[in-house]
Image (tube, rainbow, N blue to C red):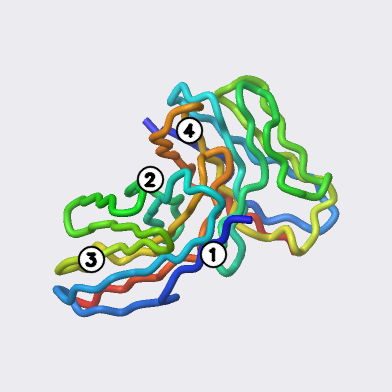
Amino acid sequence: EDQVTQSPEALRLQEGESSSLNCSYTVSGLRGLFWYRQDPGKGPEFLFTLYSAGEEKEKERLKATITKKESFLHITAPKPEDSATYLCAVGAMKKLTFGTGTRLTIIP
Amino acid sequence: DTAVSQTPKYLVTQMGNDKSIKCEQNLGHDTMYWYKQDSKKFLKIMFSYNNKELIINETVPNRFSPKSPDKAHLNLHINSLELGDSAVYFCASTPLLRRNTEAFFGQGTRLTVV
């Protein structure tokens, strides 16, 4: 059974302080690793899909990377509007297995 | 121009009642889903429908019955509601058979059973 573990559970950063979120996974044949952002009271919003080790994707201050066992979401010089819960998931869309997320707070 | 819309956004009801949540997507996607997010923010799939056909049922109690009248709609009916059913329920959709499986989620329905 696919498993996803995210760490840390919560992270508080000062504005401009770069850091990384971790997503460790075990899956029988990676069919895709997905990063989502979820704001309070809203549904998850798609950020990235990574399909194989070594792949990287970037969007504004976010960069996602992946190895055979884990994925990182790097946040460079974050701003308060980056505050949200970041969710990692594995599998094809027929069945996504989510982690419990990292709640990120950026302090002005 | 909401892509995936759910109604209602909030639902408070008593134990034992029967309630329904509606979902509609205007993206032309073939596959729709129901996910449940518990109090610890853990998001877990419940059902998946492709062109009105059930393709995933993840050991959900049979008090939960999804219904898809057409591929743009997926409703969730819950009978005999229990306290443990309290959660946020998300509807999602995605094109079928596309490798780039960008999923669109609705805003969620917060169900509170009292």
Q: Point out which mark residue B94 bears.
A: 4
Q: Using residue A26 as the reference point, say whether residue B2 is left or right of it.
A: left
Q: Residue at x 45, y 66 (%)?
A: A24
What is the count of numbered marks?
4
Residue B76 rendering spot, x and y as whole percentages: 69, 39
Separation of marks 2 and 4 at Cα, in angstroms = 17 Å
On screen, residue B19 above or below B68: below
Separation of marks 1 and 3 at Cα, in angstroms = 22 Å
Which residue is identified by label 1?
A: B41
Question: Is disc 2 in the same subunit as disc 3?
Answer: yes
Separation of marks 2 and 3 at Cα, in angstroms = 20 Å
Separation of marks 4 and 3 at Cα, in angstroms = 27 Å
Question: Is disc 4 in the same subunit as disc 3?
Answer: no
Closer to viewer: mark 1 or mark 3: 3
Question: In the rendered structure, which amino acid carries the disc numbered 2?
Answer: Tyr
Which residue is identified by label 3?
A: A75
The residue tagged with tag 3: helix, strand or loop? Answer: strand
Q: Residue at x 49, y 27 (%)?
A: B97
Which residue is identified by label 2?
A: A51
The residue tagged with tag 2: helix, strand or loop? Answer: loop
Question: Is disc 1 in the same subunit as disc 3?
Answer: no
Separation of marks 4 and 1 at Cα, in angstroms = 22 Å
Separation of marks 2 and 1 at Cα, in angstroms = 25 Å
